[in-house]
Amino acid sequence: MRVILMGNEMYKSKQNLAQLFDVPLKTLNNDLTEMRKLSQFQKSILKPSHKRVYVSVEGYRQFLQYKQEKREKAM
């Protein structure tokens, strides 16, 4: 399991993050695409090369909370 620590922030690979949050990799990829479009979540994704992608665990959790609040407002 690959974990990157930067300051107090923990980053995980896409595969490990999908496992941690129990979501399919395809769902995670869709979420990351949406995160890249939203300025408040762009810094939660590190892409040091074309093959390596690391995502902040806390940033992804906040994104899921954002999606939940957006969904609840729409109801």
Image (tube, helix red, strand yellow):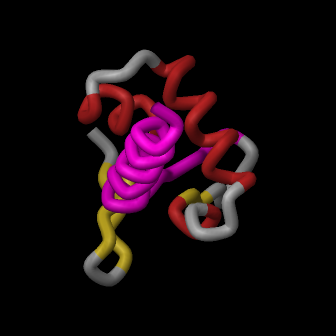
Q: Quadrant of residue 72?
A: top left
Magenta stretch mostly in which secondary structure?
helix
Question: Which residue appears at 33% of the width and 46% of the height?
Answer: 2
Q: Is 14 on the left-hand or right-hand side of 51?
A: left
Q: Quadrant of the N terminus?
A: top left
Q: Position of residue 46 (x, y in %)?
A: 58, 60
Q: Residue at x 38, y 57 (%)?
A: 62
Q: Which residue is more in the foreground, 51 or 60?
A: 60
From the viewer's perspective, is 15 left or right of 5?
A: right
Relative to 22, 69 lies left or right: right
Give the vertical position of 47 relative to 16 (above or below). Answer: below
Residue 67 counted in the magenta span: yes
> Within the magenta stretch, is there residue 6?
no
Left or right: 74 as drawn, with respect to 4: right
Q: Position of residue 23 (x, y in %)?
A: 36, 22
At a point 62% along the width and 29% down the height, the residue shown is: 30
In this rendering, the count of numbered labels is 0
- State the extent of the magenta-drawn residues as a range: 51-75
Q: Is residue 26 above or below residue 72?
A: above
Q: Is residue 7 above or below residue 40?
A: below
Q: x, y percentage for residue 45? A: 57, 57
Quadrant of the image occupied by residue 56: bottom left
Residue at the far bottom: name it.
7
